Amino acid sequence: MAVHIRLARMGTKKMPFYRIVVADQRSPRGGRFIERLGTFDPARAELRVEGARVQHWLQKGAQPSATVAVLLKNAKLGAEAEAAPATKA
């Protein structure tokens, strides 16, 4: 089972709000997830993340999506950026 750290869209039409979640790569974008790690509100440019849990999942081999990798890098959570972001094959 390949595990990814990615965004799950919430909110209403034209007012997106995202949860940062750990999910099986086969799950749909807004569907089933394993654990919620934080939130991202692009309207306020606000990012809230549980850094310890992110580190835990990265050590277990979870791959961040390209967008999540950029968000974590900007949040200065260190080693997240060293893991190559997941790409679609």
Image (cartoon, helix red, strand yellow):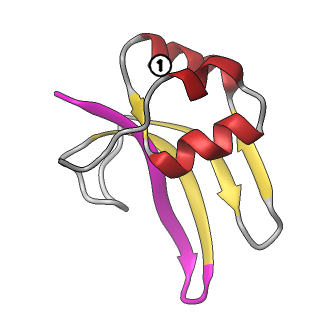
Q: Mark 1 highlights which residue?
A: 58
User: Image quarter for residue 29?
Assistant: bottom left
Mark 1 Cα-neighbour bin, 10 Å: few <14, some 14–19, many ≥20: some
Q: Which residue appears at 72% of the width and 25% of the height?
A: 77
User: Image quarter for residue 22?
Assistant: top left
The percent position of residue 11, horizontal first and vertical second, equals: 58, 74
Q: Quadrant of the N terminus?
A: top left
Residue 54 seen anywhere in this rendered image of the structure: no
Q: In this rendering, is residue 30 above or below 33?
A: below
* Residue 80 in the figure: left or right of residue 77: left
* Residue 57 in the figure: left or right of residue 71: left
Residue 34 seen anywhere in this rendered image of the structure: yes
The percent position of residue 79, horizontal first and vertical second, equals: 62, 18
* Residue 4 in the figure: left or right of residue 35: left
Q: What residue range appears in magenta?
A: 1-15
The percent position of residue 68, horizontal first and vertical second, equals: 55, 45
Query: Within the magenta stretch, is there residue 5?
Result: yes
User: Image quarter for residue 17?
Assistant: bottom right
Q: In this rendering, is residue 35 above or below 57?
A: below
Q: Nearer the viewer, residue 27 or 70?
A: 70
Q: Main secondary structure of the magenta part?
A: strand
